[in-house]
Amino acid sequence: MPPEPTDEEVARRALGDKEEFALLIARYEAKLGRYLERLGVAGREDREDILQNAFIKAYRNLASFDPELSFSSWMYRIAHNETMTFFRARRARPTVELDEEGTSLISEIRDERADTAAAAALRLSARELGAALERLPQKYRDALTLRFFEERSYAEMSDILEMPVGTVSTLIHRAKKALREMLAGRIDI
Amino acid sequence: MTTDHQSGSLAKRVLDRIEGERVRPRPRWEFLARDWFFWLLGGVSVALGAVAIAAALFEVANADWRFWAATHGDFMNFFLSAAPFLWILALALFILVGYVNIRRTRRGYRYPFWLIALGAVLTSAVLGGALFAAGLGEPIEEAVGDHPPFYRPIEAAERAWWLSPEHGLLGGTVVGVSSTSDAFTLRSFDGSLWQVGADALSTTSAAVVERGGEVRIVGVPSKATSTFEGCYVFAWQVEGARRAPPPAAPFALRLKAGAPSGTTAVAVAAPAGAPGVPRVETFSVTARSNPCTGVSPYGSPRAISGD
């Protein structure tokens, strides 16, 4: 059985045959849907709108895809930019709804003070964390979402957010600090 | 935008829209052309930065920092007049424009601002240094400097600084040596003719006069109109200019000036930090006549004029 074609191979083939593009949509639909939800696009229909627009934009600009990047980062970038356009157009405030996946983020914040956190008790629900993320500036929320929920590397985040790796690192550091301050008293750290 | 949320999978809906809206992938050359366009703009900005650096180097090299005390009295005044602020501002602007354009190239986002700025400044500095060395600093500085109403090219500014006989500063072209060999005639930069006494000149200064060409003189104004007692004479040199220096037209007549035997050489400290300027210059002073007593080319104009 031949190996599954990579995203990059499918993208190249889709330039000549748009039906191939359906395979890429199928691969990314669920992942990007979750990503949009974590960015704060609460409505399912809104997410679908954004996804449709993102995929059409990706198809239109398929020839600009840089094979040195991963297709995944490129697709996330388009979805991210489309989401920001959506927020600006609707003047909508993001609504972050999290389930237990927020745990890794809380661990990460707490780890910064690991010496005192050994016996720390987690007293924060996913809902409270989601509410705190909502109040963070968008750029901080983007950084934390990509890093801790999407588990992206700094290099991938650099390609998605279109900023230098060093800036990504600074952003994550500041975002964690801002979140920690926002949650002061809610988690024992 | 109308969006169908109901019928079929997302993939099908997207493909239907692609079909319905006749969406086609844009050709690759469009993206490449866009990328090259921004690289080109970035490159042009760096090149303009090099032009700014060449002009700045010309300005710095020709401000003649040795004489700041004589021409301005106060170093801060001199610095504000001589430092190439316009060109530094222009360089900063071009670097910023270069950054914005390089940032918009395909992978431009990967480079931090400081890296692009440093690279652009270094590239501009190397190119600008080459332009200056090739003698292009002067035409750039003068051509651009002639246009902004608030800016005067450095050579014009410096000529104006040396048209201040009441403060012991005079600049111009030596047009003749008197038959009595105790004076020479100078056409100052504003076209006036001056008789400059040469009794007090050292042999070094006298040699500068005898070579002819443009000079700057530190001296003492006389009470008579259009006469001046020369104490020190320096050749008027333009650094980094492409044009040939004025042809030397040595005068047949020699000046009587010169250090007699038993002259004491006195070292006069030149201001520190002047590029290409020796730290110490030596003058023979025992042959000075009274008017030049206490006059130093690096002293303040107030001291020279005695006011």
Image: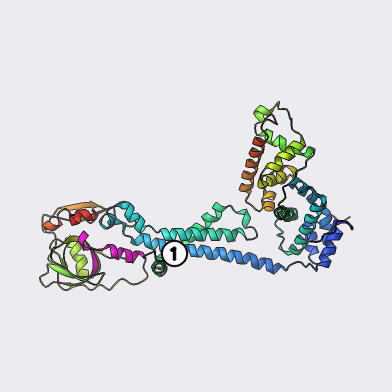
Q: Nearer the viewer, residue A41 or B77?
A: A41
Q: Residue at x 72, y 69 (%)?
A: B27
- Chain letter behind tag 1: B
Residue B68 is one of the magenta-drawn residues? no
Tell me if B131 is positioned left or right of A142 in this view.
left
Q: Amino acid at mark 1?
A: Ala
Residue A17 in sight from this viewpoint: no
Magenta-drawn segment: B151-173
- Hey, which quadrant is residue B177 in on the image? bottom left
> Residue at the location (24% across, 53% down)?
B300
Residue density around tag 1, few if under 14, some if 14–19, many if 20 or more, within 10 Å: some
Judge whether B189 appears above or below A98 on screen.
Answer: below
Look at the image and say whether residue B157 sits in the magenta stretch. Answer: yes
Q: Is residue B210 left or right of residue B133?
A: left
Please, is residue B160 above or below residue B175 in the view?
above
Is B141 or B262 nearer to us in this picture? B141
Task: Please indicate, yes or no, whether residue B91 appears anywhere in the rendered image.
Answer: yes
Q: On the image, numbered disc 1 is attached to which residue?
A: B130
Which coloring applies here?
rainbow
Secondary structure at numbered mark 1: helix
Q: Measured from the top left, where is residue B192 in percent x and y?
A: 22, 71
Residue B299 in percent (x, y) is at 23, 53
